[in-house]
Amino acid sequence: MSTTKKIFAISALAMGITMPVSSFAQATMDHGKMATSHASDSMTDGEVKKVDPDTGKVTLKHGEIKNLDMPGMTMVFTVRDKGQLAKLKPGDKVQFVVIQEGGKMVITDIQPVR
């Protein structure tokens, strides 16, 4: 058997082995459930320490941010929609969603807890 035929035969076998596995993975994954689960896990509890509506920043003492694998601490966040800061004041308990965007932590949603 020539070298070219051997390479072709080995390639065909390799394709036959890997194709069913990748097809199985695609067929069994439910991407809709994954997205929903991730969104609900991304809410974090916090307490407002300082609000700066002019710069669009808020200082929060927060619990673990699971979607970013970050422990609880106090830090300053940028808020995507500055209008959300109007309803917040120091001492408020909040729930918020934060993502990593352009090297910064950005709050995409923040709501007071009543």
Image (cartoon, helix red, strand yellow):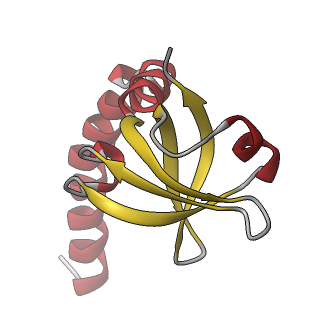
Residue 102 to residue 82: above or below: below
Picture residue at 52% right of the left edge, 78% below the top: 103
Camera-side residue: 23 or 26?
A: 26
Residue 58 appears at what percent x and percent y? 57, 58
> As displayed, is residue 28 above or below residue 10?
above
Task: State how many labels appear.
Answer: 0
| In the displayed structure image, the side of residue 41 where residue 77 appears, left or right | right
Q: Residue at x 38, y 40 (%)?
A: 46
Could you tell me which quadrant the N terminus lies in? bottom left
Q: Residue at x 31, y 69 (%)?
A: 8
54 or 12: nearer the viewer: 54
For this orientation, the residue located farthest to the bottom is: 3
Taking the image as shown, residue 37 lies to the left or right of residue 70, namely: right
Q: Is residue 70 left or right of residue 57?
A: left
In the image, farthest residue toward the top: 114
> Residue 20's spot in the image, x, y percent?
29, 35
Foreground pick, 4 / 15: 15
Using the rendered view, name the quadrant where residue 83 is placed: top right
- What percent of the width, then of the height, locates residue 44? 38, 37
At a point 33% along the width and 21% down the height, the residue shown is: 28
Vertical order, 27 against 4 (above or below): above
Q: Is residue 99 above or below residue 30?
A: below
